[in-house]
Image: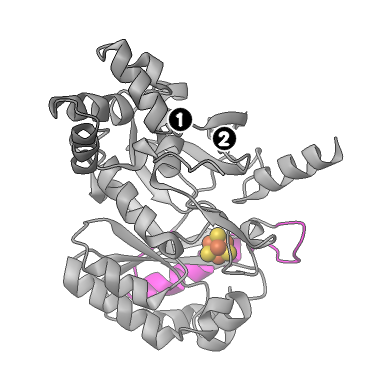
Amino acid sequence: MEKEKPDIRSMTLEELTEELGRLKEPSFRAGQIFQWLHEKMAPDFESMTNLSRDLRRKLEENYQLITLKQADVRISAIDGTRKYLYELPDGNIIESVWMQYKHGNSVCISSQVGCRMGCRFCASTLDGLERGLTASEMLEQIYRIQTDTKERVSNIVVMGTGEPLDNYENLIRFLHLISSEKGLHISLRNITVSTCGLVPQIYRLAKENLPITLALSLHAPNDEKRRELMPIARKYPLEEVLEACDAYFTETGRRISFEYSLVKGVNDNTNEAEELSRLLKGKNCHVNLIPVNPIKEREYRRSSHEEIEAFKNTLEKNGINATVRREMGSDIQGACGQLRRSHLAENRIS
Ligand code: SF4
């Protein structure tokens, strides 16, 4: 079997410089190529017009240049949100979302094909994990969206399909490349990475010296309920997860964002809001309340507007910062992973 060529878009500038040395090319070429790959977001070697034909051919022969193919896009008539489906080089399909806010354009990217974490309210995990994405496949979601919309992306949330910390090395590589001064140079402070609570990886991430925001998916105020909704809670109880979050804050000075999906009759009553307040008391944190998006494979329903407001008011009365996440693109298969699932189902039938 032919050996797979190295993925040039996942390489750091230092690695690229070494590669160019191996090809007996001057090292300044590495900077030019890096710029093509990450600032100009070149979809192929052919477009790198300030490189000689000979060098472009050499690159073609020695490396693969990962580029995503747009398989579908849905544009919300309500708020302009765009949901993209991209085809990876191996034929897998992933989903990415572009949202416009007053403070700039935000992209929510996927970090894996599928997910093995099994959260009960999530469509992305229904078929398990296929594989983690490479750094280039994460970058490409942003590059293709910025090319398509012709608008600068200023914020990134790694909250699409997948558990980012379950694809740790590729995630870290991605963070270095997307924030590189010689690439799109997106500030790490504008990047949020969400996790369902992989404790060892949270400690590891705290040591990386990356000023990103960590968002912890909490979804319940106690272990019993959390175990019901998130199988990972059986491995890492709340006490351990919150200790890891405290360590993350101490190490980085970055305030943790706690994500809490409100599911009607499951975790949304006022007693639970009180319990959550006690759990987070004294922490420098922020709670993001997310009205759950129903998925047809599960029976969970969304809390009413009044229930959501009451939950939020209870937190605030207890001195916990909370916001209700504004729903974006509700007319274009809102819940994460749903558009991908319906696309796959349609293609299976046809
Ligand atoms: S919510 Fe996130 S971690 Fe949980 S199953 Fe879905 S994609 Fe995986």
Q: On the image, numbered disc 2 is attached to which residue?
A: 84
Label 2: element kind:
strand
Nearest to the observer: residue 298 or residue 71: 71
Mark before the other along the chain sequence, 1 or 2: 2
What segment is highlighted magenta in the picture? 295-323
For the residue marked with disc 1, what is the amino acid? Ile
Which residue is painted at 59% across and 32% down in the image? Answer: 78
Q: Is residue 346 above or below residue 286?
A: above
Q: Position of residue 292 (x, y in %)?
A: 61, 60
Evaluate whether residue 26 shows in this view: yes
Left or right: 299, with 94 as reference point: right
Q: Quadrant of residue 192?
A: bottom left
Q: Position of residue 214 (x, y in %)?
A: 33, 62
Q: Is residue 166 magenta?
A: no
Evaluate whether residue 104 shows in this view: no
- Marks 1/2: CA distance? 8 Å
Q: How many marks?
A: 2
Q: Position of residue 339 (x, y in %)?
A: 67, 43
Which residue is painted at 21% across and 56% down in the image? Answer: 211
Q: On the image, numbered disc 1 is attached to which residue?
A: 145
Q: Quadrant of residue 256?
A: bottom left
Q: Do the numbered discs 1 and 2 sit on residues whose CB atoms are within 8 Å? A: yes
Nearest to the observer: residue 330 or residue 226: 226
Which residue is painted at 66% across and 38% down in the image? Answer: 331
Q: Is residue 222 above or below residue 63?
A: below
Nearest to the observer: residue 217 or residue 33: 33
Task: Please state the quadrant of the image where ligand 1 appears.
Answer: bottom right
